[in-house]
Amino acid sequence: MRRFSTRIANVLATALACVVLGAGAARAQVNFKFEYAAKFVCGLAATSPGAIPGTLPVAPGYYYTAVNVHNPSTTDLNQIQKRFVIALPGENVGRKSGFVPEDLRADDAMEIDCPDIQKRLDVGLGRFVKGFVVIRSTAELDIVAVYTAAVAATGSVVTMTTERVPKRP
């Protein structure tokens, strides 16, 4: 009888392992049908003493980006992945983060802003960085990037623009 109980326990443990591993594999094999790339510019772009005027990649100032992501569906769960990629001046390739998974339920929205980007890229809060937030999703999204700039960290906005980020063909 004891041998029969051990055999049943082993069969149940194997079945449970298959279910758990199968669920993990299903998550890993998500079909991301859509991809978006939103530009970001974040932090203080400042000239250094002795710098040649006009050599910064952008004008001196404080730059802010907020990427708003909305799942317009009324019934679906939308799985997304987001990655952060640095674009360096001088035609140099920057580093990138790994993909971070998120779930957006029907009519959910989230914002990805400069502190999030700087944290994911481990560049330090307020440090100047520019590049792309790449978002993959299982369904279409509404993505709008908001860009602002100021002359001082506590100063008034001197420019603001919004851009609807299209899905890639």
Image (tube, rainbow, N blue to C red):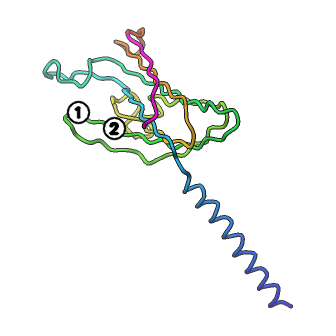
Residue 102 horizontal side relative to residue 135, left or right = right
Residue 35, percent from left and from top: 46, 40
167 part of magenta stretch: yes
Quadrant for residue 13, please give it: bottom right
Element class at badge 2:
strand
Q: Is residue 14 visible?
A: yes
Q: Residues within 10 Å of mark 2 (few under 14, many from 20)?
A: many
- Foreground of the two, 135 or 117: 135
- Foreground of the two, 34 or 130: 34
Q: Residue at x 37, y 40 (%)?
A: 85
Which residue appears farthest toward the right when viewing the image?
1
Residue 54 horizontal side relative to residue 125, left or right = left
Q: Quadrant of the C terminus?
A: top left
Q: Residue at x 86, y 91 (%)?
A: 1
Residue 109, percent from left and from top: 60, 30
Q: Residue at x 55, y 56 (%)?
A: 28
* Picture disc at residue 16: none
* Picture disc at residue 89: 1
Q: In the rendered picture of this protein, how many numbered marks are placed on residues?
A: 2
